[in-house]
């Protein structure tokens, strides 16, 4: 226990019996059994024995004719309210003269006054509201102070029994009957039953913040104005109190008077502060001073200095009480800086809570104190390098392990997240250089510590921390932690967040060879390589080799998926550089990459198409089991692609690649050379004719492609005189002439026919030409007749329209704008409708514009 008060006798051996006491300021009022009222002035003394200077100031022997059983002083209104001879009276505080008796209170048992002070803004003096409740038989009389008197409220409160004790609480009154407590709502009269009073008389005391203390046997139950408990547990006393009052922050109670004990406790937290032994105490009065009285003696409880009380409580580890008292210190008369003093107590309290393993409460207090995070983290071993730990004065942190350590880490995580959020609100640009550097240091320490905690108590949170764009984890410290706990996936994330891509890929490649584990196989390495941008092309090439060798299909995704996956944020890689790398590494993989680029991405760059052709050619020429397949693909691509440039390619194709060369020659427009390959070297008439079909375009440079084939079969030289055209093939030539006569210039063809050619051999050709020309003449005649008939019809319509008349009057409306025509110019349509000429023109312009 502490020693919060000194108990000093101020009035001893009073010859008259005391029945009640009250106090205000430095004054003590005593009501006696004979009805006398005595006033003492009690002055503080510097006497080292602690005695007070007590002066008898006034005695009024005619105050009452019967014992004064209850006294209340309302200093603000300069009145004394008393209960004597079962009636409530009001006296003047200065003169003790009777002002009036409340005759309606005849038969009163007890009363309770409630004073509220209102301080309206701008008002020169405060306003007071005084209410009085008086228990009279089975009802409560209610009064309010107005115009220097107590005026009845319009209603009384009826009770099931006589109230032995009452107390105001907001707009409710707590009532203690002989056997139970209840709450009565003064606005409605509603009665709320609470609980039995116990074995002793009921006792009610008002507390701050609209609360009440109701005594039941050895405990005080704290309730609000609705009668609901505000604390989980009641305040316990050594014995049942007979008198009880509140003096911040203490509850003071007289226990059994015969035992001579006064107990002082706190209710939040619950703590026995002091027990004082006096002789037969019966009465208690609290104002600026505290007085206890027996029938003939009065003692004063003198509080020790707040600092002395605080120091005692801190020694007893009662920090909450210390804080309550510290908040009561006044800066101007205490000699200490209140704010610093409270901070010191809070700090020691936080350390005490930590030592008690109450980590959450402890760290909340550290957060409120804005303690340096390094100091808080330093309470946990091994979370900070020794150089960074801020030592606590004379405090030894408990050694934690197992569940207690985990519990501590969880509380630390919440603390660090709050600090992180708070620091995140402060922009570097708003701070000076020194503070900005300090903030960066704090951010680094906080994030690194969070990482260490997560690894040990909730490893699922490590990834989100490291993925966060603004994580500030210290690289080396975090690296050591993750390595120690073998968190390889998280270590990769750390390297990635710190742009240490080389380290990340080295680790991924090392773990990819493992038979099991989250990084086993190529997938994580591929994902990482896919996330890198073009600025890391060398790393991508270096670390993709193993994957391309062992998993070519999967490895190819490194270069492809980033362009196609909508979730990918990586920039596309330069295709030309990827092609160059893959060509040197593996031509087959380079082919598959280029096929994807050209076929799926629809890339039309000629250099890429040429590259794919040369790769096909190289693989076809290289032999092996796939050579034929690559040559087939080469042919298909040469036929399908419109984007490659043939000129630089043709020199790379050997002479025996006849079909491929023919396609390239055709691409270059060298039709005769291409046809020579089909017709003469391959002797494939169908391919030659198919080539002509593909290339023929009337009115273009390839208009005479069939004629060229015809000449070639006749053995006539064409554009390439260095190559022999071989023996004439008159049969093939005449077949071309007959089958494709419509695409051949007849005079040119007849001009090159050998003179010895028999007429019957070209008869079929000539018949088809004549038939075609006759058909064209007949078609022309039909068109001519149709046009003539159309002209006649138009002429007839015009004559019919011009011969008809339309009478335009003032009542006619325009068919477009629906306004009168009057004398405006107008247009007449064949169906007889008319409209303004400008409306007609506007419609004409609009239709032309569309």
Image (cartoon, rainbow, N blue to C red):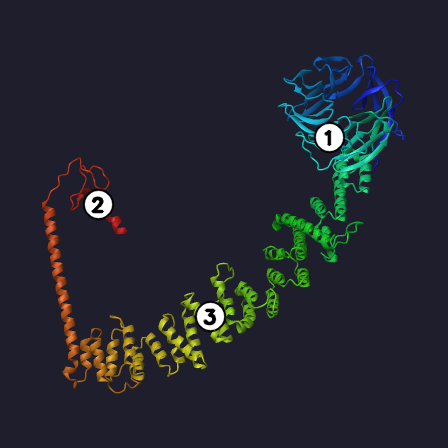
User: Where is residue 348 shown, x and y percent of the image?
Assistant: 77, 45
What numbered label is drawn on residue 213? 1
Separation of residues labelled 2 and 1 (CA atoms): 98 Å
Where is residue 3 drawn, in percent x and y? 84, 35
Residue under numbered circle 2: 840
Would you call the spot at circle 2 few (<14 residues within 10 Å), some (14-19), or many (20 or more)? some
Point 43% across, 73% down: residue: 612
The residue closer to the viewer here, 362 or 106, is 106
**Does any portion of residue 645 appear in the rendered image?**
no
- Report, in whole angstroms, how far the alpha carbon at label 3 lies from the one at label 2: 63 Å
- Residue 7 seen from this side: yes
Lower sequence index among marks 2 and 1: 1
Q: Is residue 529 above or below residue 56?
A: below
Q: Which residue is drawn at 85% across and 22% down?
A: 295
Q: Measured from the top left, where is residue 811 in percent x and y?
A: 17, 35
Q: What label does residue 593 carry, if any?
A: 3
Please, what secondary structure does the residue beneath circle 1 have?
strand
CA distance separating discs 3 and 1: 85 Å
Q: Tell me where residue 275 sits by quadrant.
A: top right
Comparing labels 3 and 1, the label whose residue is closer to the camera: 1
Quadrant of the rendered structure where residue 111 is? Answer: top right
């Amino acid at each position: 226990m502490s020693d919060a008060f000194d108990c000093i006798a101020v009035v001893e051996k009073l010859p008259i019996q005391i029945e009640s006491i009250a106090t205000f300021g430095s004054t003590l009022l005593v009501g006696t059994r004979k009805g006398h009222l005595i006033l003492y002035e009690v002055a503080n003394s510097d006497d080292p024995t602690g005695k007070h200077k007590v002066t008898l100031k006034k005695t009024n022997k005619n105050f009452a004719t019967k014992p004064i059983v209850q006294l209340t002083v309302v200093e603000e209104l300069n009145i004394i309210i008393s209960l004597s001879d079962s009636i409530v009276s009001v006296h003047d505080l200065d003169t003790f003269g009777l002002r009036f008796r409340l005759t309606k209170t005849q038969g009163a048992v007890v009363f309770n006054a409630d004073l509220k002070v209102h301080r309206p803004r701008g008002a020169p003096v405060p306003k007071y509201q005084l209410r009085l409740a008086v228990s009279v038989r089975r009802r409560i009389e209610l009064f309010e102070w107005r115009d220097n008197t107590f005026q009845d409220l319009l209603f009384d409160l009826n009770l099931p029994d006589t109230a032995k004790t009452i107390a105001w609480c907001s707009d409710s009154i707590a009532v203690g009957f002989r056997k139970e407590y209840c709450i009565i709502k003064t606005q409605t009269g509603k009665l709320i039953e609470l609980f039995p009073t116990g074995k002793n008389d009921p006792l009610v005391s008002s507390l701050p913040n609209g609360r009440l203390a109701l005594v039941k046997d050895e405990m005080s139950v704290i309730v609000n104005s609705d009668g609901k408990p505000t604390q989980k547990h009641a305040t316990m006393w050594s014995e049942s109190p007979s008198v009880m009052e509140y003096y911040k922050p203490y509850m003071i109670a007289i226990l059994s008077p015969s035992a001579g004990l006064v107990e002082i406790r706190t209710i939040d937290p619950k703590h026995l502060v002091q027990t004082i032994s006096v002789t037969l105490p019966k009465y208690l009065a609290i104002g600026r001073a505290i007085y206890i009285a027996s029938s003939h003696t009065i003692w004063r409880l003198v509080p020790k200095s707040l600092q002395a009380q605080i120091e005692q409580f801190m020694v007893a580890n009662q920090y909450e009480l210390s804080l309550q008292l510290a908040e009561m210190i006044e800066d101007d008369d205490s000699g200490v800086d209140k704010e610093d003093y409270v901070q010191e107590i809070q700090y020691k309290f936080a350390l005490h809570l930590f030592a008690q393993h109450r980590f959450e409460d402890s760290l909340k207090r550290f957060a409120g104190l804005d303690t340096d995070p390094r100091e808080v983290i330093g309470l946990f071993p091994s979370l900070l390098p020794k150089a960074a730990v801020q030592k606590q004065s004379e405090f030894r942190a408990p050694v934690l392990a197992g569940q207690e350590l985990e519990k501590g880490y969880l509380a630390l995580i919440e603390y660090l997240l709050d600090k992180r959020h708070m620091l995140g609100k402060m922009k570097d640009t708003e701070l000076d250089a020194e503070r900005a550097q300090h903030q960066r240091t704090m951010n680094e320490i906080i994030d690194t510590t969070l990482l260490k905690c997560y690894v040990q108590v909730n490893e699922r949170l490590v990834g989100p921390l490291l993925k966060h764009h603004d994580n500030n984890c210290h690289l080396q410290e975090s690296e050591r932690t993750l390595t120690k706990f073998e968190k390889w996936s998280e270590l990769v994330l750390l390297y990635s967040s710190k742009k240490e891509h080389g380290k990340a890929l080295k680790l991924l490649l090392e773990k990819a060879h493992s038979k099991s584990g989250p990084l086993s196989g190529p997938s994580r390495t591929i994902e990482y390589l896919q996330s890198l941008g073009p600025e890391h092309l060398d790393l991508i090439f270096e670390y993709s080799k193993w994957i391309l060798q062992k998993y070519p299909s999967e490895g190819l995704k490194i270069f492809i998926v980033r362009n196609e996956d909508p979730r990918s944020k990586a920039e596309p890689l330069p295709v030309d550089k990827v092609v160059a790398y893959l060509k040197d590494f593996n031509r087959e993989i380079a082919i598959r990459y280029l096929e994807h680029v050209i076929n799926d991405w629809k890339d039309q760059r000629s250099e890429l198409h040429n590259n794919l052709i040369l790769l096909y050619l190289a693989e076809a020429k290289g032999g092996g089991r796939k050579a034929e397949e690559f040559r087939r693909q080469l042919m298909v691509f040469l036929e399908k692609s419109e984007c490659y440039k043939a000129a630089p390619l043709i020199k790379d194709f050997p002479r025996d690649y006849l079909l491929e060369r023919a396609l390239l020659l055709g691409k270059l427009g060298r039709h005769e050379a291409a046809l020579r390959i089909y017709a003469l070297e391959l002797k494939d008439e169908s391919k030659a004719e198919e080539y002509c079909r593909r290339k023929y375009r009337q009115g273009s440079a390839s208009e005479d492609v069939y004629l060229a084939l015809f000449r070639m079969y006749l053995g006539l030289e064409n554009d390439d005189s260095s190559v022999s055209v071989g023996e004439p093939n008159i049969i093939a030539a005449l077949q071309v002439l007959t089958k494709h006569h419509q695409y051949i210039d007849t005079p040119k063809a007849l001009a090159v026919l050998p003179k010895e050619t028999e007429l019957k051999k070209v008869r079929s050709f000539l018949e088809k030409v004549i038939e075609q020309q006759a058909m064209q003449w007949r078609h022309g005649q039909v068109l001519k007749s149709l046009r003539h008939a159309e002209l006649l019809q138009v002429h007839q319509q015009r004559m019919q329209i011009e011969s008809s008349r339309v009478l335009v009057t003032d009542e006619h409306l325009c068919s477009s704008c629906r306004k009168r025509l009057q004398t405006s110019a107008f247009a007449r349509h064949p169906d007889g409708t008319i409209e303004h000429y400008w409306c007609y023109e506007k419609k004409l312009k609009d239709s032309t514009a569309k």
